[in-house]
Amino acid sequence: MIEFVLDGRSKVATYMQLVVQVKQALRVGLLRPGDQLPKVREVAQALAINPNTVLKAYRELVLEGLAEGRPGVGTFVTGSLAGPSLGSQARLRDELVAWLERAEAAGMSPDDVNALIETTLRGTPVPHEQS
């Protein structure tokens, strides 16, 4: 089951943060076709947001063919974004967790980690300290 977390500092709209988190869960195999998404009311209460915001996110997922609403029952995953190598992803995730623990031990903040990851993904060269 997915647990949503909102970033109040993000410039991304709240409903899109929910959409992105569902897509991430689909990519790593945390959600699979047939799984039920959390009830709108539960998500709204847990995150202290308007239920219409959750509905908007779920509608977006339906429009993208990743979910379907079943009246009176809930919203269910219908699509997948997971690649064929979920086992490889699990191993890489374990390595990433270990790396994040080392980064935290080295004094890096979550913002520092995000900046390093984003610049690396963009291929931006990072200056190295001179010895």
Image: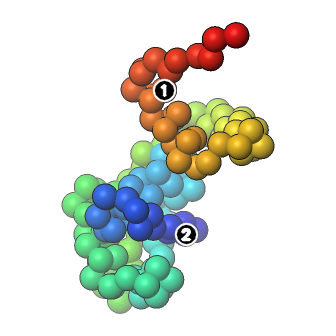
Amino acid tagged 2 = Glu
Dot 2 alpha-carbon crowd within 10 angstroms: few under 14, some 14 to 19, many 20 or more: few
Residue 66: quarter of image: bottom left
Quadrant where the C terminus sits is top right
Could you say which disc has been placed on residue 3 in the image? 2
Q: Are marks 1 and 2 in contact (CB under 8 Å)?
A: no
Residue found at x 38% / y 74% = 75
Residue 60, placed above or below residue 46: above
Quadrant where the N terminus sits is bottom right
Considering the numbered disc 2 on the image, is that residue within a helix, a strand or a loop?
loop
Amino acid tagged 1 = Thr
Give whichever of 127, 66 is nearer the camera.
Answer: 127
Residue found at x 71% / y 43% = 107
User: Pointer 1: what residue?
Assistant: 120
Kindly give the residue lying farthest to the left in the view shown: 63
Give whichever of 62, 121 is nearer the camera.
Answer: 121
Residue 121 in the image: state x and y as whole percent: 45, 28
Q: Earlier in the sequence, mark 1 or mark 2?
A: 2
Residue mark closest to the camera, 1 vs 2: 1
Residue 46 in the image: state x and y as whole percent: 50, 83
Residue 49, placed above or below residue 85: below
Could you say which disc has been placed on residue 43 in the image? none
